Image: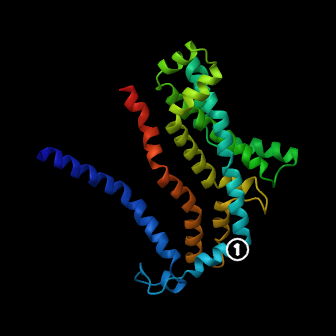
Amino acid sequence: MTPKQIIGKIGLWFAVLVIVSPAILFFLWMLSLSLKFEVDNAAYPPVFIPEHFAWKNYADVLASNRFVTYFFNSLIVTGSAVLALMVGVPAGYGIARMAAHKSAIVILIARITPGLSYLIPLFLLFQWLGLLGTLVPQIIIHLVVTVPIVIWIMIGYFETTPLELEEAALIDGAGRWQVFRHVALPIAKPGIAVAFILAVIFSWNNFVFGIVLAGRETRTLPVAVYNMISFDQLSWGPLAAAALVVTLPVLLLTVFAQRQIVAGLTAGAVKGG
């Protein structure tokens, strides 16, 4: 390895460290807050590693009936990502194969439009239908936002996949649906994984929809963390523990699926070259 390559690699790692270190620091500090008693959290100078760990913070969070209810609500709402895939993947394949550029532009507009733009009209609609306070409005509005995300990702992915295999299957007598199911889908697994993970992250972390459209018993986990903030007293330990519990599922999903994420994000660049 030449000195120039060594300097380049050192520079790359330094840049990665500068970009990633704030996020790592914030995560470690939140972990420290969740494991400390309030006396240690209010201490000056700050105590990063306490002498005694306050596991009670996690126990109090998990023992809350409302928190468990919100957890299952988040699971149900986030499960709409599967519906988004069922709609978005075939739509992305059809738009890519038909070269429907105008439809792609419409999807792009829907993709970049802020979700808050849909909130007020859908709120009035669900209020008129008497659905406010149930999980149905949240599932629908999450689909409204995540389906364009999935379609846009899959359009870009299907446009970079080779057509030779599909044409060979058509020559052998396969129908268009069979080609999509047995040829296109297996090739598009990395792209589907990326679209699914992005849809899950959006649905799991979204706060505004959960607090506006949901009722007392149908709110999601981000709202549960918000409810732990009060004007009278702010307990940093339980609040940080709740935030970590909310973050953990998405973090584990990203860690275990990182290979598929990298493959899906780089496939277009590799095949395009």
Q: Amino acid at mark 1?
A: Ser
> Which x, y percent locates residue 112?
57, 37
| Residue located farthest toward the left when viewing the structure as drawn | 3
| Residue located farthest toward the top when viewing the structure as drawn | 171
Q: How is the image coloured?
A: rainbow
Position of 57 relative to 124 (above/below): below
> Which x, y percent locates residue 231?
65, 74
**Residue 234 visible in the picture:** no
Residue bearing the label numbered 1: 64
Q: Which residue: 49% across, 70% down? A: 30
Position of 20 relative to 60 (above/below): above
Classed neighbour count for the residue bearing mark 1: other residues with Cα under 10 Å, few (<14), some (14–19), many (≥20): few
| Left or right for 22, reference 198 | left
Q: Which residue: 64% across, 18% down? A: 175
> Which x, y percent locates residue 119?
71, 45
Identify the image quadrant of residue 47: bottom left
In what element is the residue under mark 1? Answer: loop
Q: Which residue: 52% across, 42% down? A: 194
Give the position of the C terminus as an image quadrant: top left
Residue in front for this viewpoint, 158 or 36: 158
> Which x, y percent locates residue 99?
56, 18
| Left or right for 218, reference 2 | right
**Residue 270 visible in the picture:** yes
Position of 90 relative to 10 (above/below): above
Identify the image quadrant of residue 116: top right
Position of 166 relative to 140 (above/below): above
Q: Which residue: 70% across, 51% down? A: 77
How many marks do you count on the picture? 1
Residue in front for this viewpoint, 160 or 151: 160
